[in-house]
Each structure stands twice: as C-alpha cells, then as structure tokens.
Image (cartoon, helix red, strand yellow):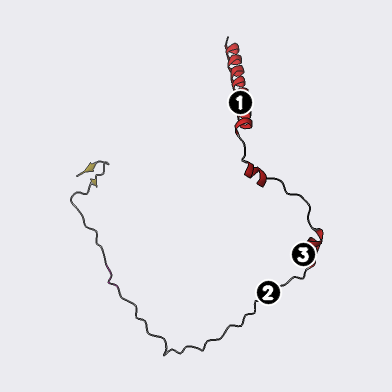
C-alpha cells in the first residue's frame, strides 16, 4: 500500500512540474514581446571590416611620452622667513574610579550579596 501511495505522489508531482514548465514557455512566447524601437536597435552588426584601415593602424608608429617636463626651481627658503609655530598645551584630565554603595559584591560561595 505504501508503494502505491509514493508512485501516485511522484506521478502527480511530475505532471504538475511538466505542466508548470509548459505553461511558462507558452506564457513567455505569447506575452513577452519587445517594442519595435528596441528590435531595430538589437539587430546584429555585419562582420565586414575595412581591412586597409586595420592594417594602417597596425603599421603606424608608436609614440612614447617623454615625461621630461621642465619644472621651475623655487629659491630656497631661509629659516628667518618661516613663522614660529607654538603647540597648544592641553591640560591632562585624570578620572579616578569611585566606589558606590550599589555595587554588588560576590562571596566565596558564588552568591551575590548587596
């Protein structure tokens, strides 16, 4: 009896999956359409290229940049021209822990006492 029940369940599940796939394929073929403007834009390009232009590009001379830029030198700065900068001194703040009466203290037995 158990074997027949499993066969019926597997058969109905298979039928539902096949019907679902078929319905999705039918639905996509009927409903999904692209607009005419987009169909004109997605046409494949022709694979014909101008070989003479490609050969000219291959044979042109390579130009490498020189990276030699003339940088104007600035006169050296004397120590008299630099303003003296004094750092600001900030006061040091110390925080001392304070005990409160509400702190819980653990006993040796592991119990918390107030």
What's the residue at 18%, 51% (across, down)? 101
The quarter of the picture where residue 63 lies is bottom right
Q: Nearer the viewer, residue 28 or 93?
A: 28
Number of marks in the rendered image: 3
Q: Are marks 3 and 2 in contact (CB under 8 Å)?
A: no
Q: Is residue 70 above or below residue 37?
A: below
The quarter of the picture where residue 36 lies is top right
Give neighbour class at mark 2: few <14, some 14-19, many 20+ (Cα, 10 Å): few
Mark 2 and mark 1 lie on one chain; the one further toward the N terminus is: 1
Mark 3 and mark 2 lie on one chain; the one further toward the N terminus is: 3
Mark 3 and mark 1 lie on one chain; the one further toward the N terminus is: 1
Q: Is residue 45 left or right of residue 110?
A: right
Which numbered mark, 3 or 2, is in the foreground of this view? Answer: 3
Label 2 sits on a secondary structure element that is: loop
The single residue placed furthest to the top in the displayed view is 1
What's the residue at 63%, 28% (across, down)? 26
Give the label on residue 65, or none. 2
The percent coordinates of residue 57 (x first, y second) are 77, 64
Give neighbour class at mark 1: few <14, some 14-19, many 20+ (Cα, 10 Å): few
Give the label on residue 57, or none. 3
Name the magenta segment's main secondary structure. Answer: loop
Give the label on residue 23, or none. 1
Q: Mark 2 and mark 1: span between their CA atoms?
A: 63 Å
Label 1 sits on a secondary structure element that is: helix
Q: Nearer the viewer, residue 38 or 80?
A: 38
Give yes or no for residue 63 being in the magenta stretch: no
- Which range is magenta? 90-94
The percent coordinates of residue 28 (x first, y second) are 61, 32
């Amino acid at each position: 009896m158990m074997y027949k029940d499993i066969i019926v369940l597997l058969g109905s599940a298979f039928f539902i999956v096949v019907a679902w796939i078929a319905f999705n394929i039918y639905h996509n073929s009927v409903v999904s359409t692209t607009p005419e403007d987009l169909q004109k834009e997605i046409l494949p390009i022709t694979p014909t290229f101008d070989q003479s232009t490609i050969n000219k590009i291959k044979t042109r001379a390579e130009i490498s940049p020189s990276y030699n830029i003339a940088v104007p030198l600035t006169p050296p700065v004397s120590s008299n021209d630099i303003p003296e900068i004094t750092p600001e001194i900030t006061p040091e703040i110390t925080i001392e822990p304070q005990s409160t009466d509400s702190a819980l203290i653990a006993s040796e037995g592991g119990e918390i006492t107030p």
